[in-house]
Amino acid sequence: MLNVGLTGNIAAGKSTVVELFKKWGATVIDADVLAREAQAPGSAVVAAIARRFGADVLRQGDLDRAALRAKVIGDDAALADLNAIVHPAVQQRRLELRRVAAERGDAIVVNDIPLLFEVLDPAQFDAVVLIDAPVALRRTRLRALRGLSNEDADRMISAQMPAERKRSLSRYVIENAGTVSDLEQRAREVFADLRKLAARAGVRHEAPGQTLLLCALDAKDAAAPVLQAIERRYTDGGIRVAQTTVRGLPKVLQTVKPLSIVATTAAAAGARTAWDSAVPPRPCRLYHLSPDPDPIAVRLDLRPWGHDRIALSEEDGAGLAPRGDLL
């Protein structure tokens, strides 16, 4: 799993990029959503906020966010106190969701964290993506989209660490000073690179250039979208992917020693026969697609490569714990 931190100062366009990454197959953990959950009425976090900032930040037991914002904007000490109350609870929940995503086999997890550099160590992420735009343009956006005065907009902008200090600490910087199409194009380029990093992370123990063999019943079966998605994933990881049919598999196994074979449901029986008969017999792992694999050996997240998650059965894999890669 590739663990990505995504951030951007207010009105830089972060939310737009997050939605694009989600649409393209990333799992998103939104720190703002987690903060709202942590600040639910009656929670320990809300009680601690009221003790620090006064009962007037509550309205019928719920948090009055406008009143709280007025108390912390422009007051660095008050903002630090608020962060010290809220962020530990958010961090704990975020780590829990990240663990669940890893167990599920998710390929790319994007942590949407507005104050990533202010409250966390960026080194805990495999890559950090920063969305940035000029201050003057962000001020204009705040005025147009939120109806803020210049004074209020400047207060909100100055409450965050300047983006200039974040740029050198980020692996990717997505500039958002142009059109929405420009932003989408740059986001697509970055996501393609994240996809390759995720694929390589999955095969990091294998030498590049080794072969994954995909086996179909015939040419029509070989055109299955799931096989194409598997091919894109492992090609991104530096693994050579070859395709064959059941009829051609015995001959291929005379010359190629693949790391693994993945057979379609229609090709499963024929692939098993060729695999058993190879010299030496059973020369590699054999997996097959199934609508209801039992036992499940691999849960493969192919969403960033254009397909839903899949599960594969492994021959002789009874009792194996589910894992997130074929190799």
Image: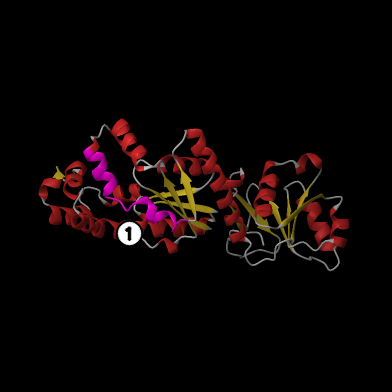
For the stretch drawn in magenta, what is the main secondary structure? helix
Nearest the camera: 295 or 238? 238
Nearest the camera: 83 or 242? 83
Instruction: Quadrant for the C terminus, please.
Output: bottom right
Q: How many marks?
A: 1
Q: Is residue 72 on the magenta stretch?
A: no
Instruction: Magenta stretch: give its range.
Output: 151-170
| Coordinates of residue 142 in the picture (x, y in percent) | 31, 36
The reply, left or right, for residue 138 in relation to residue 17 is left
Above or below, 114 against 137 in this view is below
Q: Is residue 167 on the magenta stretch?
A: yes
Residue 326: which quarter of the image? bottom right
The residue under the point 83% across, 58% down is: 274
| Coordinates of residue 223 in the picture (x, y in percent) | 74, 41
Going by the numbered disc 1, the residue's amino acid type is Val
| Coordinates of residue 97 in the picture (x, y in percent) | 42, 56
Give the residue at mark 1: 119
Nearest the camera: 173 or 115? 173
Nearest the camera: 322 or 34? 34
The residue under the point 62% across, 64% down is: 204
Residue 95: which quarter of the image? bottom left
The reply, left or right, for residue 44 in relation to residue 205 is left
Pointer 1 local density, CA inside 10 Å: few below 14, some 14–19, many at least 20: some
Above or below, 114 against 81 in this view is above
Above or below, 86 against 22 in this view is below
Tell me the SS state at disc 1: helix
The reply, left or right, for residue 17 in relation to residue 71 is right
| Coordinates of residue 268 in the picture (x, y in percent) | 75, 52
